[in-house]
Image: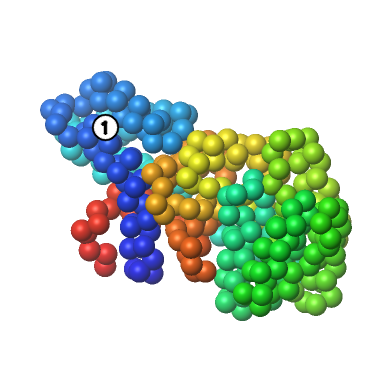
């Protein structure tokens, strides 16, 4: 785990430079904690993709802690802010699996965020955990999406349920659920189309898919995971709000956190949607999609490369 922590810390280098270093610049070189400091901090947080409401909330919490702890030295504020960020991110939230029969995980998100890759990596991870896994190619609007999922199926040794391009996604979901029940599959991961240009169509399509799944397995889907690309910053936050309204999202997978300066968006997503981030991607490898551990993220964000990880 120490190896992954080091990888996470290295992956957050650009975000640290864009976010933490600028926050520390606000705190250093000042003799007192005053309103000007708080206003400057607020500005830095907003510019770091934390989101307006979350930035206001963090600064307000910091003001209260300063009074409560009777802090007078600006140099002490970095540690307090780190604690507040860890608090905002909350506890680690695990995936919800069915107690009996197949667990259905619906994966949503716009095209280009790494949705298919995320599904492949999740399938690989579940298989390593000893689960019997199946994938469903529910994005029938792009032949490339079906092909991509099949390539991942071959890599992981996982069966892919598919139909022709242009087929009804709900029919694919139905086939997958039936196959899973007859073959004692533990987890079915269902891909969906990522079209945003017509919200009404997207909403209706997802509702139909969910309706078909729930009719066959009451209480399913057990998870609706939204895949977001961290490099898009505030755009990812807007997508989270839209899909929350459309799809009833239960968890977020944040990809491409390594090498982006916009990792602060994790705070905005958590603060403004209250949807838990359940996985983060910090590399291209099969094992570089990991469960999101909030306290580790906060520690890695504020960590320094020269520090030794125990």
Disc 1 element = helix
Circle 1 residue: 66
- Residue 34 left/right relative to 211: left
| Residue extending farthest front | 144
The image shows a total of numbered marks equal to 1
Asked where in the image residue 23 lies, by quadrant, the reply is top left
Task: Give the position of the C terminus as an image quadrant.
Answer: bottom left
Say which residue appears at 25% left-offset and 57% top-offset.
305
- The picture places residue 298, in percent across and down from the top left corner, at 36, 50
Classify mark 1: residues with Cα within 10 Å, few (<14), some (14-19) or many (20+). some
**Colouring rule applied to residues:** rainbow
Q: Quadrant of the N terminus?
A: bottom left
Between 191 and 38, the one nearer to me in the picture: 191
Please name the residue shown 59% across and 61% down the image. Answer: 117
In this view of the protein, which residue sits in the foreground, 306 or 185? 306
Query: From this viewpoint, is residue 250 visible?
Result: no
Left or right of 120 on screen, residue 45? left
* Residue drawn 52% across the image and 69% down it: 286
Residue 171 image point, x, y percent: 86, 58
Where residue 9 sits, quadrant-wise, is bottom left
Image position of 309 (left or right of 235) = left
Q: Return the residue found at the far top.
A: 35
- Asked whether the viewer can see residue 55, the reply is yes
Residue at the image point whose x is 64% and y is 59% from the top: 116
In the rendered image, residue 295, in percent from the top left (x then y), is placed at: 39, 54
Q: Residue 297: x, y in percent?
A: 39, 53
Residue 125 position (above or below residue 38): below
């Amino acid at each position: 785990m120490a190896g992954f922590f080091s990888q996470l810390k290295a992956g957050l280098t650009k975000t640290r430079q864009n976010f933490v270093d600028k926050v520390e610049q606000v705190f250093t070189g000042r003799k007192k904690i005053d309103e000007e400091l708080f206003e400057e901090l607020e500005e830095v947080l907003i510019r770091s993709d934390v989101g307006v409401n979350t930035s206001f909330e963090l600064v307000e919490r910091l003001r209260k802690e300063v009074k409560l702890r009777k802090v007078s030295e600006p140099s002490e504020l970095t540690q307090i802010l780190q604690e507040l960020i860890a608090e905002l991110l909350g506890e680690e939230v695990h995936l919800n699996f069915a107690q009996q029969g197949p667990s259905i995980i619906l994966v949503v998100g716009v095209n280009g965020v790494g949705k298919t890759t995320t599904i492949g990596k999740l399938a690989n991870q579940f298989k390593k955990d000893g689960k019997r896994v199946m994938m469903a190619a529910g994005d029938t609007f792009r032949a490339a999406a079906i092909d991509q999922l099949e390539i991942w199926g071959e890599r992981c040794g996982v069966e892919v349920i598919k139909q022709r391009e242009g087929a009804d996604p709900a029919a694919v979901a139905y086939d997958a659920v039936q196959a899973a029940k007859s073959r004692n599959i533990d987890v079915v991961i269902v891909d969906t189309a990522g079209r945003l240009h017509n919200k009404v169509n997207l909403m209706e399509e997802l509702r139909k898919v969910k309706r078909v799944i729930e009719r066959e397995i009451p209480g399913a889907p057990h998870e609706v995971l939204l895949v977001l690309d961290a490099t898009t910053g505030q755009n990812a936050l807007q997508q989270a709000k839209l899909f929350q309204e459309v799809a009833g999202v239960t968890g977020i997978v944040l990809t491409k956190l390594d090498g982006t300066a916009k990792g602060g968006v994790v705070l905005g997503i958590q603060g403004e949607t209250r949807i838990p981030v359940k996985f983060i991607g910090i590399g291209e490898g099969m094992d570089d999609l990991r469960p999101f551990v909030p306290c580790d993220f906060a520690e890695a964000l504020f960590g320094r490369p020269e520090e030794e990880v125990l």
